Amino acid sequence: MLVIEDLKVKLGDKEILRHIDLEIKPGETHILFGPNGSGKTSLLMTIMGYPQYEVVAGKIFFKGKDITNMTIDGRARLGIGMSYQRPPSIQGLKTRQMIQICANNGVDVNSLAEEVNFSDFLDRDINVGFSGGEIKRSELLQLMAQNPDFLLFDEPESGVDVENIALIGKTINHLLQRDLHSTYAKSKKQIVNERNKMGLIITHTGFILDYLTADKGQVLYEGVLACVGNPIEIFKQIKEAGYEECVRCVK
Amino acid sequence: MREIDRRAVDARDKKAKIGSDIDLDSYTVESPVHEQVGDLNMLPEGDKELLISAGVDTSEKERSGTYIQKDSSAIFSFSHDDGLEIIPIKEALEKFDWVKDYYWKLISVDADKYTARTHLDLHDGYVIRALPGSKISFPAQTCLYLEKEGFNQNVHNIIIAEEGSELHIISGCASAAHVTQGLHAGISEFYVKKGAKLSFTMIHHWAEEIMVRPRSAAVVEEGGLFLSNYVCMKPVKSLQTSPAVYLNGKGAVARLYSLLVGSPGSELDVGGRVYLKGEDTRAEIISRTITNGGNIIARGDLVGEMPGVKGHLECHGLILNGGFSRAIPELTGKVNGVELSHEAAVGKIAQEEILYLMSRGLTEDGATATIVRGFLSVDVPGLPSQLKAEIDRAVEISQKEMM
């Protein structure tokens, strides 16, 4: 479970998040909406533990531990993983090696890569010269190897071509254990109850809603979580009335 | 007196254009004669360890031939391949008339005092030749090491890849553990003939007070390829070299890679200059340097002299634990239609890259080490796996020492 209590965050001298309260229960996936510059990426980076995002008040708990001051790698080892929108490229580090790093021990990189149609990129330097869509597939592949319990996705659809968008949706669905079917031994309900992967997904286009049923939608507006609700309903309202409507809730 | 001797005498105190000046008279050019050995395993343990650390496979299992020189003595010189000749240069100059067609033909004997003295006080060196059409399957290996304290070793090497041949050489230069003061001056002249392929991988293995002044040049004929890997990751007092490559023949290609680590007290000034003279010639110079408290100057110069030639230069320097890092890329176009480019960067490891790796579970130190390893791992197309493994091993050892 992730619990954020009255979080206030500064980036440099600027206050970018205020009074954030958020709770994501095991098995839940939340969608994070919000206009550009509202602080969505900052919230994800703060949860991941990037030191330039300075927590000036409030706390973050994960799996019952106060992780507010924990290092990034500590959080990664505790089970938090992130898919970045614009990750840095690293010269000389092969994608294959990066996948091994994510897995922390032996993993069948080749077969994993096949699942996201990424085999041809394994012997290329990570992110060097990758297109927007290639970056997204590379990020998903890394998360597949890392297998975290809580997954943060920063606009997983941006820059992805039509051909691969379904693949991205399907993979995220799988990472979040949202694609499990009933079996002879277990009913669908049992499987859903046993689901423990948690997700927080930033989306601009709402595409992800075509592939998975998220539990909640959150709107971040000017550094404040403005509303919580049914993600499809929120998305519909945003499409109809834009984020202007959110101003009322923030006040 | 022969003209070449006279020129050498005149230049015996001529300072080099770049690199700190060395007082050659503070070293001795006399050394005891070391006996030849019939088997590398007969060498003293200490010598064997030294050879192994310099990349020599003492079992010779996957080597086509070996040349080992201790101070001024060629102690082991064998070829195991019918298409490969390995001869100590003094012997070669006496026995074979053709050697003089290659001796001091690419480098001027009076370029500086190091070339001059190498001619005047020659302590052997090797002639390695791949015969026409011979594809030498395993790499040949050479090692020239200093055993005598305060010795100035002057060697001259000639490497010839005859028409259509293919040859890979790994060369280690080293000083014995007990040697503190020493100077190694080495002349290397490379001849890559029509359609031949020659790769030369040099791994330096010196000590804190050793001075090194290699002088190298290569000529590549039509359709030939010259590949050079220059690796110096161990401490050295001062190393200065700037090989010249002449791409004379149509479609000739040169690729020069250097991996350098500047430890505290070390001064490395390593360059490379390629003259693109023939039609459709191509060149690439890539250097990766890590300054770990020492000083590094990485130079590169591409000179385009024919329309349509292409060259690219990359000097990347990382300052890891203080020191001084300078990249000097130069491009010269002498005619219309040359395509030369460069990329140079000197800086620190990007924090963003460290954090990215940490978010995948690595510690900060682990992330830094991973980035450094990546920085030093340059893909060298066409290099045999055994040699790639030797370079990787040198990187691995150096990295352990740095971190």
Image (cartoon, coloured by chain):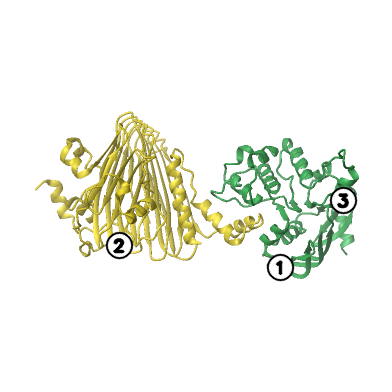
Chain colours: A green, B yellow
- Decide if residue A196 is on the left or right side of residue A164: right
**Residue linked to disc 2:** B179
Judged by depth in the image, the label closer to the viewer, 3 or 2, is: 2
Say whether residue B159 is visible. Answer: no
Q: Are marks 2 and 1 in contact (CB under 8 Å)?
A: no
Specify few, some or many for label 3: CA neighbours under 10 Å numbering under 14, 14-19, or 20 or more. some
Q: Amino acid at mark 2?
A: Val
Q: Amino acid at mark 1?
A: Asn
**Residue linked to disc 3:** A215
The residue nearer to you, when weighing B330 against B177, is B177
Do dots 3 and 1 share one subunit? Answer: yes
Do dots 3 and 2 share one subunit? Answer: no
SS class, disc 1: loop
The residue nearer to you, when weighing A224 against A5, is A5
| Subunit bearing disc 2 | B
Distance between the Cα atoms at labels 3 and 1?
28 Å
**Residue linked to disc 1:** A69
SS class, disc 3: loop
Name the residue: 40% across, 51% down.
B231
